[in-house]
Amino acid sequence: MIYPQKYANRWVKNLWKESGIRIVKPHDITLMRTMENGVRVGIPVLLENAGETFEPALTPILNKSITRAGTRLTMHIGDQDVDYSEDFSLHITTTLPNPHYTPEISNATTIINFIVIPAGLDEQLLAETVCIERPELEAQRDSLIVQAAKDADDTSKVEDDIFKLLSSVTGSILDNESVTQALDKSKEIAGEIKKRVQETKETTALINSTRNQYLNVPRRGSFIYFVIAYMANEDPMYQFSLTFFTNLFSKCIKECQKQKAPLPEGVATSAEATALHVNLLVDVITKTQIFSFIITAQVARDRGIISTSKWRLFLLGTSSIVSTGSDEEEGGNKPSKIFSDLQKTEFIKDEQQTLISELEKIVVSKSGPGNTTKQTLPLEGIKFSIAQHGTQQWEEYINLPNPEDQ
């Protein structure tokens, strides 16, 4: 299990706690003895902080090289045959963000990637937000999830009982009164479960509708976390654990609760996200302007203010432009073709002319009346304006110290 934030360790430990799970690390001197005892007695073993390679002595366990002699199951570990219990299970976790395993290890194991993704973090932070703002709502949702799982299990059990009952009947089913009564009882139970499932779905929909009013808060928190995570590739000072981040996130929300009146029912603001943003800026990255820029850009992209094509053009320049076959036949995106019918401009380089042509193609969607969406080309006409109407004025504008302030 791949999980740099170590939540997988916690999950495995809680899952097998009652079975007396044993925990070892790759370099423990008791590693093989713990493995042998687990195989023999049938105790789950957790090998945590694993790397990309394993001890050769673990190969029989990874490959499940089991030998059967009559009713006895054995596994050759080291220089001895050890009795194998079918209750044994081996769980391996690693904190490596992107490990590369050999084909032999990949085939012998089931690899699960628990690394955090934006959608998962959104849901996690949303649960944290609602748990603080509306604890009764989150508690009700948790109970519904448990109830839904129980109903699914009961439904499966009823179906299994019916199949088992029908397979054991000899003769006509209609003549067997006990079977008929059992089927009627199963039908009644199935009807109650179906009704309860429908009620659970309706209640869950109402709860989710209320929870979704808080989406802006965890969404902003998720942006901040991933921006910091990506910036850690440039400088180790930006390294944060997910546990620390979620604790800071919860702390900011609680502090906001102390500073203002309780939120009206069904209403949520971005004050918590703003507080978190301020905490991170002041405490961690006070001298870094790029952090604020990337956060702002991510919010704008999420709201549709900055399109994907515009963002790629900003980051990659002309390298983001893909020429089609028809473009290549006509000369592609060559500046000489783009401005062939217009006055030549010497103060704009060829690459800049290509970028201007691409800017004119950027489509911006705006909301219109009646939930309609209108698509516009806000930058259309720049090329014509530069080439035909005021080349000298554009050159003076571009050469200004701060043209964006004009």
Image: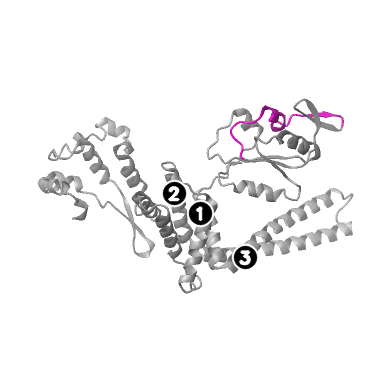
Instruction: Give the residue at x 28% y 45%.
Output: 361
- Nearest the camera: 358 or 226? 226
- 54, above or below 187, in the image: above
- 191, above or below 72, in the image: below
Look at the numbered discs 3 and 1 and tell me whether their residues touch, using CB distance below 8 Å: no
Instruction: Give the residue at x 79% y 38%.
Output: 86
Say whether disc 1 or disc 2 marks the residue closer to the N-terminus: 2
Quarter of the image containing the C terminus?
Answer: bottom left
Residue 368 position in % (x across, y down): 34, 62
- Spatial distance from mark 3 to mark 1, Cα to Cα? 23 Å
Quadrant of the rendered image containing residue 271: bottom left
In the figure, is residue 259 to the left or right of 318? right
Q: Amino acid at mark 3?
A: Ala
Look at the numbered discs 1 and 2 and tell me whether their residues touch, using CB distance below 8 Å: yes
Q: Amino acid at mark 1?
A: Phe
Of circles 3 and 1, which is in front? Answer: 1
**Secondary structure category for the residue under label 1:** helix
Q: Residues within 10 Å of mark 3 (few under 14, many from 20)?
A: few
Residue 354 position in % (x across, y down): 24, 39
Q: Residues within 10 Å of mark 2 (few under 14, many from 20)?
A: many
**Magenta-colored span:** 49-70
**Secondary structure category for the residue under label 2:** helix
Q: Amino acid at mark 2?
A: Ile
- Nearest the camera: 55 or 387? 55
- Spatial distance from mark 3 to mark 2, Cα to Cα? 31 Å
Instruction: Give the residue at x 37% y 47%.
Output: 308
Residue 295 position in % (x across, y down): 39, 53
Identify the residue position indicated by label 3 in the image. 139
Instruction: Give the residue at x 86% y 33%.
Output: 71
In the figure, is residue 183 to the left or right of 317? right
Of circles 3 and 2, which is in front? Answer: 2
Identify the residue position indicated by label 1 in the image. 245
